[in-house]
Amino acid sequence: MVTLVRPANEETIMTHHASQRRAYLTLVLISLFCLMPFFWVVLAAFDPKASQFLQIPDGITVNHFWNLLANESGVRWVLNSVGIVGTATLLTLILAGFGGYALSRTQAWWKRPLLYAIILVRIVPPPALIVPVYKVMLFLNEWINNLINSLTSDVAQQVVLSRIFSFVDGYLGLILIQTAMQLPLAIWIMKTFFDAIPKDYEEAAALDGASQWQTVRHVLIPLALPGFAAAGLFAFINAWGDFLMPLMFTSSPELQTLPLGMFRAFLRVDAIDYGFLTALAVIYTLPAVIAFAFARKFLTQTFSGGVKG
Amino acid sequence: MFNMTYEARRQFGYRIMMTPALVLMAAFIVFPAFYAFSLSLTDDALLGFAAQESSYVGLRNFSRLFSDPLFWNSLKVTLIFVIGSAVIGQFVLGFASALMLQRPVKYKSIFNAIICLPNAVPEMVVGFLWISMFASGEYGTLNRLVAWFGVEPQQWLYTFPLMSIIIVNTWRGIAFAMILLTSGLASIPKDIYEAARVDGATDTQIFWRITVPMMMPTIFLYMFISTVTTFAIFGLVYTLSRGGPANSTEILGIYIYNQSFTAFQLGYGAAVAVISLVVSMVLGIIYVKALKVEV
Amino acid sequence: MSWTKKTLVLLPIAAAAVVAAIWWSGELPSDLNPQQTRPTLVIAEHRTARLQALYQLQPKLEAELGVRLKIVEYPAPPQDYFTKLVTELRAGNAPDVFTVPRDLQVDDLAAAGYLANLTADVQAWPGYQQLPALVKTLTRASFDEQVYVVPSIVAVEQLYYRHDLLTAAGISTEQPKDWQDLLNRSRQIKQQMGQFPLMIPAGLTWGMGSYTEGFRYLLASFQDYQLLSTGNQYQLNDDAVRQAFGFYQTLVQEQLTPVNPLLNPEPWVIPKYEMFPKGELLITTCGSWCKVFDWGPGSRNPIANVDTSVQTWKFPSADGGEPFALASVVYAWAVNAKSRQQQLARQLVLALGEVDVALAYAVKLGNVPARLDAKEHPDFIALDSLMQDHALLTETRALRTTVGSNAMMAGVAQASEAVLTGRANALQAQQQLHDYVVNVLGAEMVEQQLAKTLPLPAALATEVEKN
């Protein structure tokens, strides 16, 4: 028996080794494919003579990053992105928190249709919406600017107010459209998490004499915290990386966010500053990568909704 | 309000809580989706007299659409793009990564992180990175790579435009396929494998007879999700090639944009959008029905 | 909550507060500066060369008008520039003053109500009298004959040929008298030199250039043909259109033009920047900028002694008329109809229509000033060889277009592609153009009545026609 088993064992060990080698080879090749494009951007961001081509820098410089700070537009783009995406994420969380909770708890007739509707809404391809959304935004824009002009006749104030509240080329419009785009997924995630919190907890708290607000603050929010984290991270990642909505709804340089600023700087075909752009790309990518690292473990939980985050 | 029962009040409260989110989604997604249908029946435009006052033109936009070679080209390009990158590229590489990471290999988390990295990169940066990869001339990264195999420098985005964007989207989506398929693999009971091994099944047999059939629901889920998301891509291709050269990468999203905002024909753009909406809704309804999604 | 949890929550909030503070602080001072008493005019400009010219002129313009000019840089590629401009005009947040890249875009912008009517302003402005009649026509919208733009510079376009190579080959470099003469010269070049003689832009990938740099010459070759009917519709049933496609057909059939490069993406690169400098293409249509940007010392493939080795012919007529050069009013200045500073903006565009401004731009861009009195300006000499082009201004031709020029040009691109690939003959191409424009713009925009017909298409193609 022993003699019979041993060669078999060696054989499996052999094939085991071979298949391990195959596994490593596959993984290394795929990883190289994934990493390849990053070498250039990382090297060029620190290369005093950055160009379009991958090259080993002669020296290392952080000047490109200082230029970002010194160059007003670079800072502006970063702050605009942080401001718009941050506000949109926060708004998404609040609305999705309420919406997800209601969807999870209600037994009303509208629950099922609404859940199916949310799946379908998530499938709508954003490029198919650009024309009608543009018309909607134009309509709202005209309305709000008329309102602003009737509130104040001071041109300087009008300019500032319309920069903030305009739907086209204003902060409010971008924030709202980004929020709307992130809501379906966020509601779905929140609903899933609230489903996992037994209703008894709330009822017990209510019986103990806790007010509605206390129940929410001390029972619901802490328990749903992972849900908020997941919903917030996905909303942030998607809104941060979105290119279409900024392309459609920003035009003035003061309002430009990172993706559009980069794109327009890249369109300066006769004078592209690769050092500036690669440094900017690094800055732009880092928050997304960090958020993704945190969000990764939630990723599978979003699949039930049918569409990836 | 005070006359309501406790339950009725609560139900009322749920509706209130639901409302703000619904209003936003209705205003910016649902209403526009329906509005696209009515816009597609007009000659609305950003230039000319129609910009001031558009008029109803019936199905003219659609009759133009179906005789427009650029529209058919765009549909074809979209189909090849979806099949090439989502159905084949991402799936094969993602499945391979998922399978290999099932094995007892070292540095799992490092491989995992590296494969996930492209997925985290914003679309604009993806375009930017790959424009450098594909740069023509002998110093372009890809050209230097293929030079090792004795291939002449190529103008990748010019000579193989559609292939190029397929490669880029594959690159970006491996992680998603890997993560989803890993979760599918993890749900296959281990004892089935052991039983098969005891019966003397080879690795290949195990893969085709056990893994693949057991994975079918996950694979379907993956195919649906990736098809729908790839169908909706815009920024990735726009930043890379803007649909060019010569419309060779003009996927549906970019065709809509170009017709609406570079040819300034909103009505016609809306007609294309209607086609795109119908296709994705049909996909969505099939999915909801077929998988009977648990809600 | 524990302390650590609290910090976890408070830290991001504090960070967000700091960011928000910086964000808004950056917003306010620039717009609410109380010391700022002079009104601000926003002006859009793009491309490095044009921006440089404007920055140079800025202090003078500001002093002259008592305003602050806020120059906003727009994307460089023409399509991106135009898209950004049009969407802003529609949304009502466009700059006060901007340029309209080509004259044939004026009608579409004016019809949409984006442009301020400048008729009264230019009539009271001495500079307007200095414009050639054709340029004046091109500043007016075809549907109401009102003036909507103030022209500054003009591109003069004609045939550019390799004088050095033709002379060396002993081929005549005299001005071709008519289409037949040009075709015969081309056949001779092909026979003797074995190279492609003539390139006139066409095809899908050349986009609107297939019309502006190609088809337009052929249509303008007929003195009594107008692209617009008196009813302001596109006249596409006219025999001139068929003959124009017939010219392409002849070039393709007799292999007088390099067809393959024209089917490529970026079709201009190979014929203009590679074949022409190498002498593999001898004649091409081009404009006043070509000797600077396309083949000048700073270009990618410079031609040695470009001023003498490349010379120009006017484009020959098809109907016995005089040979001619084409004119396009490029980058004319316009005022946003919704500008909050109408009066100042109008003053600014008139100031931008002055000769010194035009000269500053013309020199940088390789165009000529639109105004005839430019030649009295001391800086005129800086134009160098462009001075000859300026002298042509009074005798140039152009075709008026109306609303929907975009669709008309797209139709020309598609139909000429069909001729290039041999899928259509001249008559079919004409039909295709007609159908496309009807399909896009509606039948009411196309003259339906058939104009005169000649028995044979492409008169030029056959010697029979001559006899």
Image (cartoon, coloured by chain):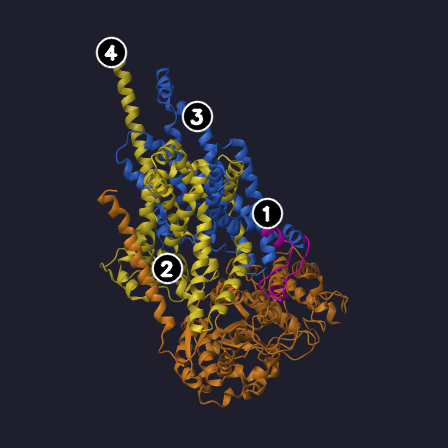
Task: Check if mark 1's residue and mark 4's residue have beta carbons within 8 Å.
Answer: no
Q: Which residues are magenta?
A: B34-59
Q: Which mark is residue A80?
A: 2
Camera sees residue A79: yes
Q: Which residue is mark 3?
A: B214
**Identity of the amino acid at label 3?**
Met
Marks 2/3 same chain: no
Q: Label 1 vs label 2: CA separation?
A: 35 Å
Q: Nearer the viewer, residue C343 or C354?
A: C343
Q: Which residue is mark 1?
A: B275
**Image point 66% across, 59% down: which residue?**
C436
**Eye-nearest disc, 2 or 4:** 2
Q: Which chain is blue?
A: B
Q: Which chain is yellow?
A: A
**Eye-nearest disc, 1 or 4:** 1
**Eye-nearest disc, 1 or 2:** 2
Q: Label 1 vs label 3: CA separation?
A: 35 Å
Per the image, label 3 sits on a secondary structure element best described as: helix
Residue B45: say if magenta.
yes
Task: Check if mark 1's residue and mark 2's residue have beta carbons within 8 Å.
Answer: no
**Eye-nearest disc, 4 or 3:** 3
Camera sees residue A30: no
**Identity of the amino acid at label 1?**
Ile
Give the answer, above or below, for where C459 lies relative to B273.
Answer: below
Nearest to N terminus: mark 2 or mark 4:
4
Q: Tell me the quarter of the image containing the N terminus of chain A.
A: top left
Q: Which residue is mark 4?
A: A3
Q: Is residue C222 left or right of residue A170?
A: right
